[in-house]
Each structure stands twice: as structure tokens, then as C-alpha cells.
Image (tube, rainbow, N blue to C red):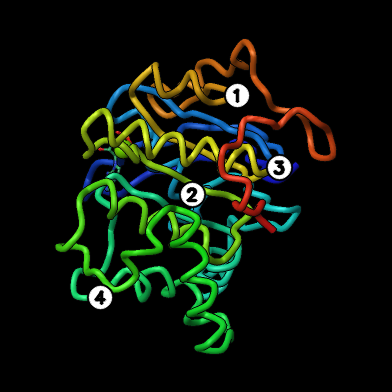
Amino acid sequence: MLISLTDIRKTYDMGPVQVTALAGVTLGIEEGDYVAIMGPSGSGKSTLMNVIGCLDTPSAGSYKLKQREIAQMDDDALAEIRNGEIGFIFQTFNLLPRTDAVENVELPLVYSGISRAERRRRAEKALQIVGLGERMHHKPNEMSGGQRQRVAIARALVNEPSIVLADEPTGNLDSKTGEEIMNLIDDLHAKGNTIILVTHEEELAERASRVLRLRDGVVVSDERNAGSTFTPPGGAGKERSSSPEIQPGA
Ligand SMILES: Nc1ncnc2c1ncn2[C@@H]1O[C@H](COP(=O)(O)OP(=O)(O)O)[C@@H](O)[C@H]1O
Ligand SMILES: [Mg+2]
């Protein structure tokens, strides 16, 4: 099991009141799975993503990533796990504004001890994979929303993460551009990456292999989509790719 969450709870202290964002989440995610997380606003989707992505620690419970207990790690240890294992794609792209595409993509590698030349080589390769080989030196304000999200996807891939987390990745895009971005995410899955996608659109969730529904900080349903192509690691059946050059996560 790649991810193993057991009775994960998260409460926020808001002065005299406590807000419960996660009220006991237990779930496992296998390597290579494609999971959509749905649920109404405030149901805990982003909090769950932040815990899985090691951006935040739970108040209680156990989180094992590749059999390592993460729940009580300090910030430095979490940052190290994050850099090595997680790729993030956000609704708002979260690119550095005055930094060109290739430098944005290199960022996750800066603290990894990889040489400058190798960082550049990997970033250029990731940008080629997302179809931005001709836009290496454009800054975010010189690109369309779809191109910015492609840069963010290249940045998410550059450290060959075990998990790609996408929180409403098409929320700020028109439907045609959103479709292109979803096709790219589907391709990543087809190449063996583990994908966790937060969305409120049923149509997007249908593309995943499995749909988790949250309500009030708990999982209220967990179902495999009909026709899911997911097969456990080592199995066959991942044949939906149209971009054979995308490499699976480490
Ligand atoms: N940093 C925070 N401080 C206080 N309360 C928070 C914080 N983040 C989230 N919450 C609360 O936790 C609950 C779940 O939020 P969130 O995970 O953002 O839900 P979703 O992404 O499903 O909309 C909400 O009630 C929200 O107000
Ligand atoms: Mg949210």
C-alpha cells in the first residue's frame, strides 16, 4: 500500500472554538491508482489533500507513506518527503510570477542536491512532455491559463513523485482547456503515476478509477468506477496513453 491513513483527525483551534476538518478518515491507496475526492464545500477535501501531501500534519491518527509513519514528523522531515514523493497541481497554478517557465519547473529540484545542469535538463524534458518545449523562457504573465497549468504540471512531475495531487486543477480554466489538462492528467495515470484529484464535477470524477466522497470530515462512500482500468502494480491494462514519453513516478 502506497498510502495508509488510519483514523486521521484534524481540528483547527479558532480561539474558543475548535473546527473539525477531518473527523476520522481511514483509507488506503495503492500505487498506480487514480482517485477522485468529491464532497461539498467545507467537507475536508483540501485538508485531506494537505495531509496526504505533507503540507500539514494531522491532529491525531496514523499516516503511512511507503510504510513510513509521517503523522508526527517535524517540518524539515515533512519538507524532505514532500520534495521527494509529492507533485502538486493547484487550481491557481501557484507559479512564481517573475520567473520563467523552466526556472519554475526547476524549483522542486533546488534542494535535492542535483547539479544545475541536470536540473535544467530535467526541467526542459518535463516542459517538452507537457507540450511547452517552445515556451521555456516565457514568464507566467506571458502565457495563457492552460499554458500556466501545463508549467505547473511539469513542475509537479520534475522530481518523479510517487503521488501527483491535483486540487481542482481545471477550476480556473475554460472547458476546452480544462479538457486538455485532464487529458494530460489521464496520461500521467496511464504511465503509472498515482493520481489524487479533488473535483466537484462528476464528469471529471468519472475519469478516475475510484471516487471517494467526503461529508463533514468523514468518507461517506468509496467506489470503483465501472470500466476502471486500474490494475494493481505489476498488472497489465494501463493502455490509455497518447503520450508515450511520460515516465512513471519513481
Ligand atoms: N486553516 C484553517 N483554519 C481554520 N479552519 C479551517 C482551516 N482550513 C480549513 N478549515 C475548516 O475546515 C473545514 C474543512 O475545510 P476544507 O478542507 O478546506 O474543505 P473543502 O476543501 O472540502 O472545501 C471547513 O469547515 C473549514 O472552514
Ligand atoms: Mg478545498
- Kindly identify which numbered label has been placed on residue 8: none
Q: Gap between marks 3 and 1, in whole Å? A: 12 Å
Residue at 39 percent across and 50 percent down: it is 89
Dividing the picture into quadrants, the one containing residue 81 is bottom right
Amino acid marked by disc 2: Val
Dividing the picture into quadrants, the one containing residue 171 is top left
- Going from N to C along the chain, the mark reached first, 3 or 1, is 3
- Kindly identify which numbered label has been placed on residue 209: 1
Residue at 29 percent across and 73 percent down: it is 137
24, above or below 222, in the image: below
Kind of element beneath mark 1? loop
- Going from N to C along the chain, the mark reached first, 3 or 4, is 3
Mark 1 or mark 4, whichever is nearer to me: 4
- Going from N to C along the chain, the mark reached first, 1 or 2, is 2
- Kindly identify which numbered label has been placed on residue 99: 4
Q: Nearer the viewer, residue 57 or 13?
A: 57
Where residue 3 sits: x, y (%)?
66, 44
150, above or below 120, in the image: above
- Going from N to C along the chain, the mark reached first, 3 or 2, is 3
Where residue 74 sits: x, y (%)?
53, 70
Where is mark 3, residue-wise?
31
Kind of element beneath mark 3? loop
